[in-house]
Amino acid sequence: MLIDDCAYPTVCGEYGICTQGQCACPLQNNSSSSYYKPVDERKPNLGCAPITPISCEEIQHHRLLALTDTSYFDERHKIVHLNEDDCKQACLKNCSCRAVSFSYDQLGHSRCTWMAKVFSLQAIQPVANLSSSVYLKVQLRPSITASTSNKTKVMLGAAFGAFAILVLLVIGVTLYLRGRRKYGDKDEEFDFDQLPGMPARFSLEKVSGCTEGFGKKLGEGGFGSVFEGKLGEERIAVKRLEGARQGEKEFLAEVETIGSIEHINLVKLIGFCAEKSERLLVYEYMSRGSLDRWIYYRHNNYSLDWCTRCKIILDIAKGLCYLHEECRRKIAHLDIKPQNILLDDNFNAKVADFGLCKLINRDQSKVVTVMRGTPGYLAPEWLTSRITEKVDVYSFGVVVMEIVSGRKNIDNSQPDEEVQLINLLREKEENNQLIDLVDKHSDDMVSCQEEVIRMMKLAIWCLQNDSTRRPSMSTVIKVLEGVMSVETFDGNSILFVQDNPSTHSVPSQASILSGPR
């Protein structure tokens, strides 16, 4: 920087002082106290900023920082003729004043210039009979003397409050532990034996023995861990709910719901254990594990062929159809995702984990409930907390797309524009590029492109924002079994019903499908 550059008003930014071509922040005369800091340590020409911003609500703590042999470039601000003390006091009483420049000329005339905004300052050499000083307004913190009393009061109040909270906490913990002991010694609160149609009840000792002390963990979920065991000659999977508060409600929901229903595409609940604080569910063992193991390629497993994927999708649909349409009360699962779809030796799929389910009376159009489920699989209407079983249809559509594409719905390892599978689906459908989403791990999938695209169109139908325009699961089954089909027309997905002589006649209807959310 050249010395002549100091002649420019903004060469050192706001509050910066230019001295022989170098920029620095203001310092109190004969003091190391600092009231300003550089905007950027590596670029001093960007200027400085007050360490403590000036507040008009604390005008009593405003002070003026004196900078002698300093001039201010911009003379366009308010100029008055006052003596130096009056000049400074007038600025202190006016909050809009951020600095004053005071000078005497050779004739002894004084000039006081007020500044509402402070640009660059310039260090000057003292000249006989001439003087120029700049006073910058700074915000001081309240003095220790003035605030000692208030601080003492605050500290005493805080100490008293902490003591009161501690006392309440001790009382609360004591009552909680007493309640837990009472709850552990008695099981009357959860008299599961009184529930009709309940599965077998096992003792904790029995379940622990079946699992060899919960030694072999199969996996972990939102409400607990799953362990492998053996009941006689039959292999079992034991779900151990963790956290009494969180587990009780989910435990009751699973026992009451699954204990009273049975379907080939729902995981069978063999029994349960409710002893002291333990909550255990004993399920049939599913040897192939959860669906996510087979579609995300995390376990170096082979790629599923198209026929197997179609069968899995149909099995899921049949399980959900039973819950929605064939039970005495509709059951909304509310957490349909690959982790809750289990596979047996022959890749038959079964819906599992009913910990979040919601029962809906047949005469209810909607139910109000708090948001539950897994991000990425939640239907848009969850934002209103008024839901129907159609939230499961939306989640089913997401799972279908994951099965078809062989990737997670939300995958942060993908480029930014491809992280969310459902958004990508909408884009590909608009551009007639659905084939780009087919799982490239499977040559079989690539050779069945037309069928795969038809499956994606079904997923798009399930993923509509308007829940009333999504199909029922019984209609989904008809599409999967070939009784009905989903085609496209003029860029919109449209459902055309086809009569199939081998089954039964279906009334003609049409529904325009919008893009998924």
Image (cartoon, rainbow, N blue to C red):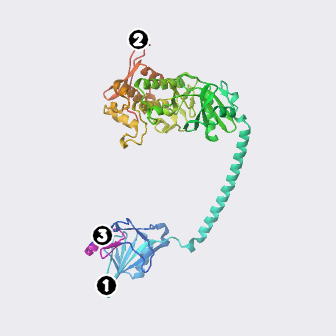
> Residue at left 66%, top 26%?
200
Per the image, is 394 magenta?
no
Which residue is label 1 attached to? 105
The answer to whether mark 2 and mark 3 are in CB contact below 8 A is no
> Mark 1 touching mark 2, by CB under 8 A?
no
Query: Could you tell whether 251 is left or right of 307 in the image?
Result: right
Instruction: Look at mark 2 in the image and give the residue it sits on.
Output: 501
* Label 3: few (<14), some (14–19) or many (≥20) C-alpha neighbours in 10 Å: many
Residues 69 and 508: in front is: 69
**Which of disc 3 and disc 2 is earlier in sequence?**
3
Choose the circle earlier in sequence order: 1 or 3: 3
Q: Nearer the viewer, residue 159 or 404?
A: 404
Residue nearest the observer in this picture, 471 or 199: 199
Residue 388 appears in the figure: no
Where residue 423 appears, as percent x and y from the top left, is: 38, 37
Would residue 22 be counted in the magenta stretch?
A: yes
Would residue 372 be found to the left or right of residue 497 on screen? right
Tell me which segment is drawn in magenta.
2-23
**Circle 2 Cα neighbour tier, 10 Å, few/some/many (<14 / 14–19 / ≥20):** few
As drawn, the label of residue 11 is 3
Tell me where residue 311 appears, x and y as whole percent. Answer: 45, 23
Q: Quadrant of residue 19?
A: bottom left
The amino acid type of the residue labelled 3 equals: Val
Secondary element at tag 1: loop
Cα–Cα gap, marks 1 and 2: 109 Å
Give the amino acid type for the residue marked by disc 1 in the picture: Asp
The number of numbered discs placed on residues in the rendered structure image is 3
Along the line of sight, the residue nearer the viewer: 416 or 158 = 416
Q: The disc labelled 2 sits on which kind of residue?
A: Pro
1 or 2: tag closer to the N-terminus: 1
Q: Position of residue 410 (x, y in %)?
A: 43, 39
Comparing labels 1 and 2, the label whose residue is closer to the camera: 2
